[in-house]
Image (cartoon, grey):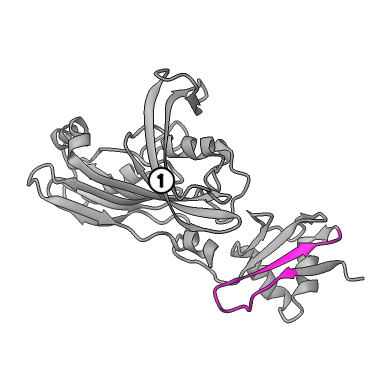
């Protein structure tokens, strides 16, 4: 009897996946060589290097990654290159008052205790000082390190304060997209809770109304599969880690978000992206709207 059996497969080259089930214990490299006789050893090594192999929803890159009976190995034939690690923010708009960027996942918004230099704030500061060494920028709002998408900076402290003090009136629309674990039953709904934070900076929902900061999140299902769901999310309040906590509360943690309950990490990052930001310009009053493309790694999970 063969040690491995094919569970389900699709043709390579069509941007699809091959799914294999493990029927005997072994190592990943030997498993792939046995099941992909038309692929050379170097081709298989390339699949591992480029993070195109997953074991039970987790990206695997080690040749000797152990396999157990019942596990599922997925081969992603399409190599997604839209999110190279280490790339800086892309400027979407700039004038004398503001800068709007598309922040990549993995980049801090501002300095932390452990990281001072590689931040969106530092990179944009260096950028504006190329023209004027005295220039400064100011953070208006933050995105978590592993969240990508639209982010707004001010070019003066007065503009920053104006935007922050009038945030609810200034911001017209703010939407995220998220890939969450499992199939979400309700096509749209509202999640409401009161958020608190532990001494270790873990945010959680209190069961007592009024105990903490009120947080309200609206979501709509855009796509659904057996393993994951793609949601569009809008915030009525902007609390720290609000989306991540509310998705966990629903029983559908965001993929890659181990801190808030995720057990899978199929794309090597947290599946949360700030998709839309629409606001009134702090000086001209003009309505501005910025909409970034949903990361290809997100949509690739539903092909």
The residue under the point 32% across, 43% down is 122
Q: Position of residue 82 (x, y in %)?
A: 44, 64
- Crowd rating for badge 1 (residues with CA inside 10 Å; few <14, some 14–19, many 20+): many
Reply yes or no: does residue 10 show up in magenta.
Answer: yes
Q: Is residue 150 above or below residue 114?
A: below
Which of the 4 quarters of the picture holds residue 2? bottom right
The magenta segment is 7-24
Q: Is residue 47 left or right of residue 88?
A: right
Of all residues, the one furthest to the bottom in this rendering is 38
Q: Which residue is mark 1?
A: 219
Q: Say left or right for 146 vs 29.
A: left
In this image, 87 relative to 68: left or right?
left
Question: Where does the image place residue 150, in percent across and percent down from the top left?
Answer: 31, 50
Q: Is residue 90 visible?
A: yes
Q: Is residue 52 above or below residue 66?
A: below
* Number of on-image labels: 1
């Amino acid at each position: 009897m063969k040690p491995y059996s094919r569970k389900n497969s699709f043709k390579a080259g069509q941007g699809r996946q091959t799914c294999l089930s493990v029927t005997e214990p072994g190592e990943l490299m030997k498993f792939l060589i046995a099941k992909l006789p038309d692929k050379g050893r170097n081709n298989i090594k390339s699949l591992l290097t480029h993070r195109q192999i997953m074991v039970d929803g987790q990206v695997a890159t080690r040749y000797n990654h152990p396999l157990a009976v019942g596990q599922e190995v997925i081969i992603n034939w399409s190599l997604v290159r839209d999110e190279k690690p280490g790339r800086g923010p892309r400027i979407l708009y700039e004038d004398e008052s503001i800068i709007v960027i598309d922040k990549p996942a993995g980049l801090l918004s501002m300095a932390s205790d452990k990281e001072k230099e590689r931040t969106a704030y530092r990179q944009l500061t260096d950028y504006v000082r190329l023209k004027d060494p005295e220039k400064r920028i100011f953070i208006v709002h933050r995105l978590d390190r592993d969240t990508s998408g639209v982010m707004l900076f001010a070019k003066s402290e007065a503009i920053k304060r104006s935007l922050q003090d009038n945030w609810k009136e200034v911001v017209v629309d703010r939407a995220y997209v998220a890939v969450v674990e499992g199939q979400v039953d309700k096509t749209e709904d509202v999640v409401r809770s009161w958020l608190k934070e532990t001494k270790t900076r873990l945010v959680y929902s209190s069961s007592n109304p009024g105990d903490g900061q009120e947080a309200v999140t609206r979501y709509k299902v855009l796509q659904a599969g057996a393993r994951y769901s793609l949601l569009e999310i809008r915030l009525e309040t902007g609390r720290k880690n609000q989306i991540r906590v509310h998705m966990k509360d629903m029983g559908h943690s965001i993929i890659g978000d181990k801190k808030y309950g995720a057990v899978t990490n199929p794309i090597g990052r947290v599946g949360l992206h700030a998709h839309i930001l629409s606001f009134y310009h702090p000086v001209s009053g003009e309505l501005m709207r910025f909409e970034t493309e949903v990361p290809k790694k997100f949509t690739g999970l539903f092909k």
